[in-house]
Amino acid sequence: MMKEILDSTQSSMDNAIDHTVKELKKIRTGRANPEILNSIYIDYYGSKTALNQVSTITTPEARLINIAPYEKNLIPEIEKAIINSNMGFTPNNNGYSVIIPIPLLSEERRKELIKVAHGIIEEGKISIRNIRRDSIHQLIHKGKEGNVSEDLIKDNEGEIQALTDKNIDRLVQIEKDKEKEIIEV
């Protein structure tokens, strides 16, 4: 029973870190990354559809994103969605695809993005701590039912804290890597 709580805790913490990493990938770093377009949806025959479901998104160069829609009549719709996304991109088209040049980031914008990244990491840390709190609460609840000794509860609390520390350290390393990526010109 205790192993189930520990496994569940680790699984939840892994999910929290995965979510944090996905959120960080949305931050534009000055390099072409197709994942920054994941939040863009277009009107596709009356329904909102993710851009990556109606086109192929590639990065032929370090500062260029190429979006090749499956249907050429979607090009104006894609351009409009990119402009309306307020990501600071100016899309062009060559009649077959939408091309997005990725401009260099100013020093001020880099500092803003680092603050955004810190905020996302902090949310991830809060999620990890909340998972720890919930897991310890489950342990205590099992102890109150009388099925588990106090020593076993204390040992497992220590393991949960160790998991928490390990995962917080992972987030700190992810934060350092992202900051380095943003600062890199």
Image (cartoon, rainbow, N blue to C red):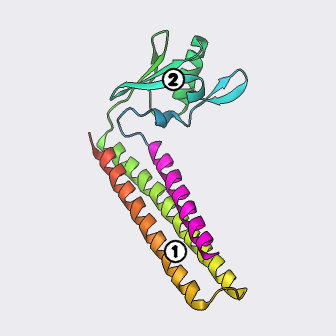
Q: In the image as oriented, which residue stretches furthest toward the left?
A: 185
Disc on res. 56: 2
Q: Is residue 21 magenta?
A: yes
Helix, strand or loop at mark 2: strand
Crowd class of label 2 (few under 14; some 14 to 19; many from 20; radius 10 Å): some
Q: Is residue 88 left or right of residue 185?
A: right
Q: Name the quadrant of the C terminus.
A: top left
The residue indicated by pointer 1 is 160
Residue type highlighted by circle 2? Thr
- Most prominent secondary structure in the magenta stretch? helix
Whole-percent x, y for residue 45 in the image: 71, 20
Q: Name the quadrant of the N terminus.
A: bottom right
**Residue drawn at 32 percent across, 29 percent down:** 62
Crowd class of label 1 (few under 14; some 14 to 19; many from 20; radius 10 Å): many
Q: Is residue 14 magenta?
A: yes
Discs 2, 1 touching: Cβ within 8 Å: no
Q: Nearer the viewer, residue 112 or 46?
A: 46
* Any part of residue 87 in sight: no
Whole-percent x, y for residue 137 in the image: 64, 78
Helix, strand or loop at mark 1: helix
Whole-percent x, y for residue 16 in the image: 54, 57
Eyeballing the image, is 30 above or below 13?
above
Q: Nearer the viewer, residue 140 or 180?
A: 140
**Residue drawn at 31 percent across, 39 percent down:** 106
The region drawn magenta spans 1-25
